[in-house]
Image (cartoon, helix red, strand yellow):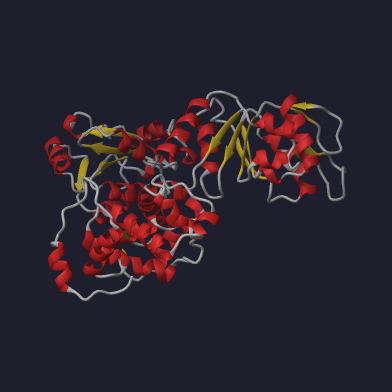
Amino acid sequence: MKTAELTDTLLCWCGADAALEEAVRAAGRPDLRAVKTASEFIEAFHEERPAYVILGAKPASETMRLLGVLAQARRAVPVFVALSEPNADQVRLFMRAGARDVLWVDELPGGLPEAGAGAQGADEALADAAPPEAREIICSNEAMQKVVDIAARIAPTDSTVLVQGESGTGKELIAGLIHTQSRRARKAFIKVNCGAIPEPLLESQLYGHEKGSFTGAIKQHKGLFEMADQGTIFLDEIGEMSLEMQVKLLRFLESKELRRVGGHEVIKVDVRVITATNRDLKREVARNRFRSDLFYRINVITLHLPALRERPEEIAILSEYFMGKLSAAHGVAPKAFSVEALAAMQGLPWPGNVRELENAVERLLLLAPAGTIEPVHLAEFLDLSQSSPASPAAAACGNGAAVPVEQAASWKLEDMERVHIERVLGALKWNKMRASRALGINVKTLYNKIRGYGLTPPSDAEPDPVPAEEASAGEPEETC
C-alpha cells in the first residue's frame, strides 16, 4: 500500500447511535468527518481515502455489512468500532470481522485516534494487524466460540492439530487462526488439499524431487514441506491419503526429516503440521482405511467444528457480513434481508455449511430484483431441494443437533409442520404478523395452528399486535 494514497483524516459512520453522533460533533476536530447513512460512508471512504475509520455499533447488522465492505477494500485502513455500552459478545464479533479495536462512546472525544500522523501512521498501525485468515472467523455460537478459544490457546505451541468437521464449516480458517497467532506467523502458511492432488504427484509435491528422478523432472524441485520451513503446513482432507502415503507422512512427522524423490540427502525441516478431514477417522481406522499409528500421531489436539445447522443463530450475522463483503467485491449496492427471510434461512439445513451460505448470499445479491431479500426470493433463487427431514427434527432438539435420518423419516407431516412453525415463531420472538408472512399463511390460520399444536410463547415473546379473537374473525382460514 502506498502511503501517498491516504489522507490525514478520520471518517466516522454514526448510524443510529445518537450518543456517538453527539460525541463526534463535540470533538470539534477539522480532520474528523461524520456521516449518518451507509451509502454516504461508502462514497466518502472511496473519495476521501481516510487514514482511519470509526463505525458505530447501531444497528449491529449494518456495522457487520460495512466491515464486510471494508474487508474487500483494496487498501487496508485501521477500523475502530464505537460502543455505547460494554458488550463482550459484540466486541468479539466485530474484532473477528476486521475491527482493529473498540472505542467507548462515553470516553470520546478523548479516545479518538490521532490522524495527524497520516498514512504512515496507518501503515504502522496495521503492521501487527491479524491477516485475513484470522479476521474472518465470525461466530456467536457457544460451541464454535469454544473451538476458537481453544485454537487461540494452543496457537503459541507447536502441537500437531487435527481439525474435524463437515465440508464448508471453516476448517481452513481455524488453521489460519492457529498460524497467525503462533510464533511462526511471519513465516509461510502453506495449504495443501490432499484429495485434489493425484497420488503419483502428491509425494513429489510434499517432499520435492531431484532433476531426472522421473520423466518430466527437468530440474530440482523443492517440496511443500521444505517451502514451509519455520512456518506451518495445512494438510486438508488427510483422510483421502493412501495407506502408502500415510506411512511416509508418519515417518516425516516423527523425524521432521525428508528425502526428495530420487535424492539421497536427508533434509531437516522445522514445520508445524495442521491436518483436517471431513471423515470420521476413528471409523476409518476400524475399517483399516487409515493407519492407527498415524491417527494417534496427528490426534494430539482435536478440534470439532459444528455444522452450520447446529448454530442457526449465526446465519443472520454471517449473511449480513457476506452481503457487505460480496457487494463490495462486485461493485454493486448491498441488499437488506427482511426479518422473515432471515428466519426462513435459519430453518434450512445448509448441507454445504458456511461455504454454501456465502454462495447463496452472492446469488441473492446478484439475482434478486428488489433491494430487500424476502422469503419469496429464497424459493426463486436458491436450491432448496436438498432440505431433508432431519432439518425440522433438528429444530425440535432445541440445540440444533441433527437426529438420525431413519428417525426423522418416521415423523408425520403434522409433526414436521409443528416444528417448523414453532421455529419460525421463536426466530421472530412470537410476532405472529411477521411469522404468518414468513410462513405464507394468514394470521387466523396461524392462530389456529398454534392452538391445535398446543404451542406456548416464551416469557420474552412480543405482545400480540392483534388479539386472537379479532384475528379469528378477520380472515378466512387457509391450509398451510
In the displayed structure, 123 sits above or below 353; it is: above
The x and y percentages for residue 358 are: 45, 55
Nearer to us in this view, 88 or 299: 299
Is 326 on the left-hand or right-hand side of 296? left
Residue placed farthest to the bottom in the image? 476
Q: Quadrant of the C terminus?
A: bottom left
Q: Quadrant of the N terminus?
A: top left
The x and y percentages for residue 266 are: 81, 27
Kindly identify the residue that appears in the image at 32 percent across and 49 percent down. Answer: 66
Figure label count: 0
Kindly identify the residue that appears in the image at 21 percent across and 50 percent down. Answer: 461
The x and y percentages for residue 199 are: 77, 48
| Residue 73 visible at all | no
The x and y percentages for residue 56 are: 24, 43
In the displayed structure, 119 sits above or below 69; it is: above
In the displayed structure, 25 sits above or below 333; it is: above
| Residue 142 visible at all | yes
In the displayed structure, 44 sits above or below 90; it is: below
Is 189 on the left-hand or right-hand side of 153? right
Kindly identify the residue that appears in the image at 27 percent across and 60 percent down. Answer: 450
